[in-house]
Image (cartoon, rainbow, N blue to C red):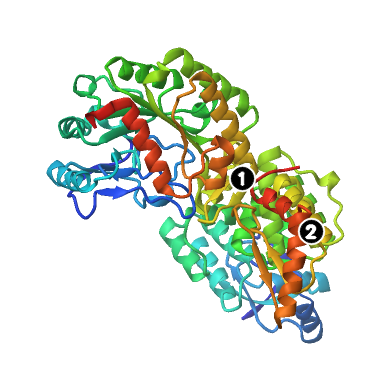
Amino acid sequence: MIKTPIDHINIHDKRFCITYPLDDVTLYTSIQKMGIIQPVMLLNVSPFVPVTGFKRLEIACQLGLKEIPSIAVDITEQEALLFAIHDNIQRSLNLIEKAHAIERMLHIGFSVTEINETMEILGLQPHEKVMKTLIAVASAEEPLKHFIVMHNLSMKIVNYLTRFEVNERASIIDLLSSVHVTESTIREILEVMNLLKIKQDKLPFDTLNPESGHELMKQLKAMTYPILTSLHQQLQDLQQASALPPNIDIKVDPFFEKEYIDIGIRARNQEDINQALEKLRRLNDDGILGRIFDLTKGNLR
Amino acid sequence: MISQKVTFVEARGNIVRDCPGTKNHICCGYKTIDLVEGCILSCSYCILKSYINSPDIKINKDYEYIFSQLSEAIDKEKNHVLRFGTGELSDSLALDRRYGLNRPLVQFFGEKKKALLELKSKWAYIDHLREYLNPYTIISFSLSPQSIINKEEKRTSPLYRRLKAAKRAQDTGCFVGLHFDPIIIYPGFEKDYEYLIHDIGSILDLKRIIWVSLGLLRFPPRLFDEFMEKGRKNLLFGEFIRGEDGKYRYIKAERIKVYTMLYNQLKNRQNDLFVYLCMERSDVWKTVTGIALDDNEGLIKLFDKRIHDIYGGIL
């Protein structure tokens, strides 16, 4: 191990960098207190090219350090990248880092077999579709990468995100950042947005003004599924008008597909049954049950 | 040009089967003959993509085996006239000119004289079969507006060729079937279907159309993901729900609206045209056609009556 002056290192050369993000508050504090303990690996060319230790180098620059403990190695580019990947593999890599690894391998000229092997080691399915998504993500804009890591998004959700244009993604990220959303809500919202974009060619960001993730989903569904939304609204109105006691439950197929409805009565005695039947008879006479049946037959008012 | 690999396979198991049908949907009781598995036409919405694992085409030419299964099914059936088709796992005519697959079947049904064979296709070439055709073979074409053929059925014959081929089949003495399946809801589809029905009325002899099926687009979830990924606007334009069988289909209100529109237009052209809904719920049947069907048996009886009205006592 030697100490290498930082100005002898090409710190802008990131061809072996897979780490994301490079900011690390804990490491910063540690280096500030103890200095750099673990040497970085450098490719022995002039100027030196970093192979591992990008976070340490970044922090060293931020702290104004003049030199850094290092090990210079004489290896090929491909070996250097594999060193970089396997140096990081001991920790759990996020999706962006996995994307960086695969994209760099492709760029440096690894064979498909070698890339597929690495994908498997990284816990990725070695499919062309997955690779396409990873490459798109590796070169994506910074806010998208940040959003993916912050929410620890799955490959499926990331795949949805890559189907949007850069400006659409920025608006989506703004929108989703303004409300509290879980990963499953993000998936649901992106799926509906994707469908809406296909149907209408553009996304109606100016008409969306949600106060919560649930509200956003509701607004999007009303645009994507207008008939179903209207049927649900009508059903809700009828249920309110019927003022059902808690021991009677009328269940309708959520997609209004089944021709029948289920009516449940919870009874403790005969009197409960009589009262429930009387209530149902009145609802039937008033036409409320008939109107619910109409909804199941696709009759929109 | 055929890009897929074609292999001849040994017949095994049940080659002649009942149409799988769908839970709580009325099925017409069709019988399928798995003569060919796989299709060269590659329509964008094709459900075979999720049924068949291999992209290759498998052909079963063990006719003795197929005939024995057909005979058994036909002889066992005492109450209904059976209808068989080869269009379940493939297009019935797309490979026929090259491999001559249908001729033995056409001849078998012509000799048997107890059941009907339907050759259902989007490939408008029947000239090689014309001299063998007999009244027990129905030549059928799936029909879509040309704009859908251009975008979603790129390798198939144009609409006018399909209609002309159907006319040629009628001219040889055959009855023809027409299948509006899948019907796709897209911007302006109403007008396109109106023109399509107009074209049918001008080119074909409506009295020699044995049946017309209406089936709106439906597909398994795997295809929904594929349509989303490929941004298939035409296929995703309507409002879809998940049916009881897990498949995506248009919401019932839309289905009723579209079926009613097409049913009325077809009936206005020819009042006694036999129009049926493919895999629909009984309440949709009732609203669209006024016909109350409780189960598959009800529809099968309608087919029996239709066949009896056309063929009289010869079947």
Q: Which mark is residue B252?
A: 1
Instruction: Name the quadrant containing residue A158.
Output: bottom right
Left of B262 or right of it: where is B8? left
Q: What residue is shown at x 52% (from left), y 52% (from top)? A: B247
Residue A176 — which label? 2
> Which residue is depicted at the point 81% across and 86% down?
A33
The answer to whether B123 is drawn above or below residue A251 in the figure is: above
Mark 2 residue type:
Leu
Q: Is residue A150 left or right of residue B249?
A: right
The vertical placement of A213 against B304, above or below, is below
Give the SS element for disc 1: helix
User: B83 or B182: which is nearer to us?
Assistant: B83
Q: Amino acid at mark 1?
A: Lys
Secondary structure under tag 2 reads helix
Across and down, in percent, residue B274 comes to 44, 29
Q: CA distance from mark 1 to mark 2?
A: 33 Å
Q: What residue is shown at x 77% (from left), y 80% (from top)? A: A26
